[in-house]
Amino acid sequence: MMNWVHIAVPPASALLAQLLIGLINGAFYAMLSLGLAVIFGLLNIINFTHGSLYMLGAFCAYLLLNFFGIGYWPSLIIAPIVVGAFGILLERLLIRHVYKLDHLYGLLLTFGIALIIEGLFRQLYGATGKPYDTPDTLSGVRNLGFMFLPIYRAWVIAASTIFCFGTWFVIERTQLGAYLRAATENPALVQAFGINVPRMITLTYGFGVGLAALAGVMAAPIYQVSPLMGSNLIIVVFAVVVIGGMGSILGSIVAGYALGLVEGLTKVFYPEASSTAIFVIMVIVLLVKPSGLFGRGV
Amino acid sequence: MKLRSLIVAAAAAILLGAAAAPGALADGKTVKIGVLNDMSSLYSNIGGMGSVVAAQMAVKDFGGKVLGKPIEVVYADHQNKPDIGAGIASKWYDEDGVDAIFDLPTSSVAIAVQQVAKDRGKVTIISNGGSSDLTNKFCSPTGVHWTYDTYAMAHVIGDAIVKQGGKSWFFITADYAFGHQLQDDTAAVVTGAGGTVVGSVNVPLNNADFSSFLLQAQQSKAQIIGLANAGGDTINSIKQASEFGIVQGGQRMAGLLVFISDVDSLGLKTAQGLLLSEAYYWDQNDQTRAFAKKFQAAFNGKVPTSGQAGVYSAVMFYLKAMAAAKTEDGAEVVAQMRAMPINDFMTKNGRVREDGRVIRDMYLFQVKTPDESKYPYDYFKQLAVVPGDKAFRPLSESVCPLVKK
Amino acid sequence: MESPRFRAIRLSILLILALAAPFGFYPIFVMKALCFGLFAAAFNLLIGYGGLLSFGHAAFMGSASYITAYTVKMWGLPPLVGILAGTAVAAAMGTVFGWLAIRRKGIYFAMVTLALSQMVYFFALEAKFTGGEDGIQAVPRGSLFGLVDLNQPLAMYYLVLAIFLIGFGIIYRAIHSPFGEVLKAIRDNEPRAISLGYNTDRYKLLAFILSATLAGLAGATKALVFQFASLTDVTWQMSGDVVLMTLVGGLGTIWGPVAGAFISVTMENYLAQFGSWVTVIQGVIFVVCVLLFRRGVVGEINYLIARRRGNPPLAKAAAGD
């Protein structure tokens, strides 16, 4: 009934190569789920819009290149700022109205916003991907012996690790991060101390969005820039956040990379299932430890 | 509060009005042609609005009228979903008086719509859908498969490559019926010509990242990596293959379903050397060039793909057949089509076979290098012509019940 | 409580409209609306009255659709038996999924249902019998008890209407019963319900199974209406669609989901040629509903009527918030 495909276990070098590729996907999962976790942790909003904001980041890079001749490196800075500002606009105008309501409404609202953004871009650009070339400084391959690794992909792994752990460090180890974490637990008290909590919330949302946009710019040379790129990814990213522990920064980073590895392995042994493996893990985690691997309490 | 209730009431009124508004009802006063394809997703470039423009051009060139009635072209987006396509087709045939539907990329939709048409005695002429099953397992007395199909692609490309020395193959296959079909058809040709299939991998749908699968292909050390996928998937595979230095390593990519629009997306730098098969290329001869020029004037300077040219060719022929048969009845018009030879800018002595398959010559092309390309859209050089009887599935191998054995 | 006379009048008007509909509208269009209406009503049982958001309800609707299509086409089962088969499978799935999902609450419950339905999608994609991308096509409608040919649009329509009324009737009875009252109590304040001695898990599971079964009934019937079963029916986007319908129509109102389904199907029909604008409009409706019209169309109407009568507390109850 099913197509069971049995592949003989490939040699270690081949496996290593697949794991490395899995790590690259994992980098994007980590960056995106990090943004989601930050937003959920502080705002209690399940930000379904995240996928389309990632897509906006990639399109921003594409448009910057094709209309203003602005290349990859400046785009890494400009796109997150532009999209982050847009995110702040969304938060101020629409999202802040649902803070007091059930989680459900936040989910539905951001789902609706995601549909609008994606529908608009689909209408304007169709669903085929637009090409975005790898920047010259990062093109070419490095022969690692067991595989040819494109230099750009190595950059993705390195850069994402820096961004992710940089964010973790700010939130967990600095004073600013301490204020943020305190504001999650008890906004009224923190406000009483004279800290402008609503502004902090707005900026946090902007930051989470900026992180998604940054991931989008980094993704542009690898995956084609397409209006659908976010919706294909968002469900998987949710799974990652749930597995890592909703609201846990470290959890989403670790889970992101780990699940990228798992997906990579599945592609070797049972490729058809590679999209679904993450969901199986999610169900297991939800049933065994619903707060996630690093989460704190349901 | 009052504003809110006003809005609710207004919305309800509008929606009720919309629901009650009947579609353009069939009144028998016009002959209606429908173009149903993918307008917004991965196949929008090979057909899309271009096919609609092609149909409109054909209607205009025919004179705008047939059997004394004006001809109208309607179109819709089936979003690559069989249920949406079948739903639109049913409504068009039942309510809106549409006589024939053209284009229909995405084989699963084409199969569904051809069935809908078959049940109602209406016509489908498929220009962009690929599965060879349309004239085999699912053949229909009112269905015609106009341009290319998976069998022909597999044969022309597979055969040519093996003859060139590409004997060992590894397939990267889109994990659904169309992909599997393409792989099976090509594998049969390859092994028949003395080659071997070293391995294959099924790639889930909606997958943008082929790196893992390309790596497996690389490790298999096959000479040829066959891409049994289409549209955006093929583009991604080729793009990423060049990223990973696969072609530098000595292996070659064979796109089993590649169109000029894909090459346009990729750019010659990435696509050079790629072998592909098409039924039409704009720069083949004076006639093809003349058509391309007219099309470009009507469609933003883009050259027509073989599917779009096929729509023009099919609409023209359909209208001619309708005029000759002196009736709108689907079965009779198609019977008339079978009785007439097809001779136009892209077809020489073609004919509609009893299983609905149009037998036409297919061409083998190779993508030029950037240096070889002298003017815009100068992408292909023609390597070979494969006559129709050799390219398409012979009747002896057919399981179509319409074929008399 | 609305007056019985008002209810009787409303019911008769709706019934007359329903019986006359195929003569004024394209029958397949109305049948589609009825199937989705039942689907949304079943979904609403869980969210509107049970307070449980399932993000994977398409799994039940779609699976039943496949089973019915397959058994009728390949095994030649008569249409009603095929529908029963599909519904039974949905019920079985509902039992298993419900048992797994009930263990968690709130957003985690939703995530479990989503993950489980993704696995169903994967299964549908890979299994041979579903036909993958092609789906199962050309499903014969057969004849009812060997007497009535269901290929006649009118005959099929009245069968679908009957099935809808039965399914909807079951939901109505369930809501207006002691079971329904306990369910609402659990939705409003679960710890209190537990303290009152109710086995809340059992009630939630029963509601889940009932909801899944009726969603399956809708899907099974839909397979015969369109003579088609495809992957679209088991995607998470389809689960999202039913949430939209229920939200627009009115969570926790009886007729809301049905109204929402009709609105959604009409919109799709009217706007099909505009491609991606449909997505944009759906998104706008979501946003507007969440921010301004949380009660949904029917909810708003109920609220306005209750307010007109000068019954503010009733207005609150009618809002079902």
Image (cartoon, coloured by chain):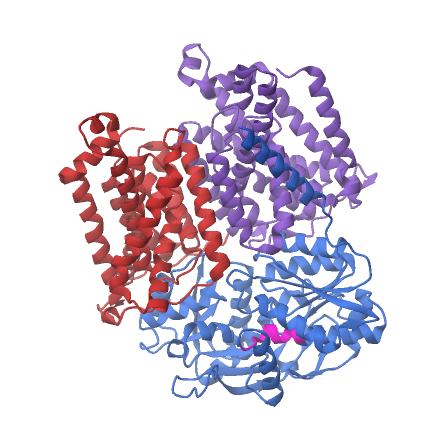
Chain colours: A red, B blue, C purple
- Between A198 and A14, the one nearer to me in the picture: A198
The residue positioned 61% from the left and 69% from the top of the image is B51
- Image x and y of residue B13, in percent: 66, 38
- Image x and y of residue B292, in percent: 58, 81
- Between B361 and C78, the one nearer to me in the picture: B361
Q: Residue furthest front?
A: B2
Residue A189 sits in quarter: top left
Classify residue C275 as left or right of residue A242.
Answer: right
Q: Residue furthest left?
A: A174
**Residue B132 included in the magenta stretch of the image:** no
- Image x and y of residue B397, in percent: 66, 72
Q: How many marks?
A: 0
**Residue B309 included in the magenta stretch of the image:** yes
Quarter of the image that includes the N terminus of chain C = top right
- Between B179 and C71, the one nearer to me in the picture: B179
Q: Is residue A81 above or below residue A67?
A: above
Residue B285 sits in quarter: bottom right
Q: Is residue A151 above or below residue C286?
A: below
Span shown in magenta: B303-312
Q: Is residue A90 above or below residue C106?
A: below
The residue positioned 76% from the left and 36% from the top of the image is C158
Classify residue C226 as left or right of residue A79.
Answer: right
- Image x and y of residue C109, in percent: 42, 32
The residue positioned 41% from the left and 29% from the top of the image is A102
Q: Is residue B60 visible?
A: yes
Residue C220 sits in quarter: top right
Q: Residue furthest top?
A: C196
Q: Residue furthest bottom?
A: B286
Classify residue A112 as left or right of residue A16.
Answer: right
Q: Is residue B395 visible?
A: no
What kind of secondary structure does the magenta stretch mostly adopt? helix
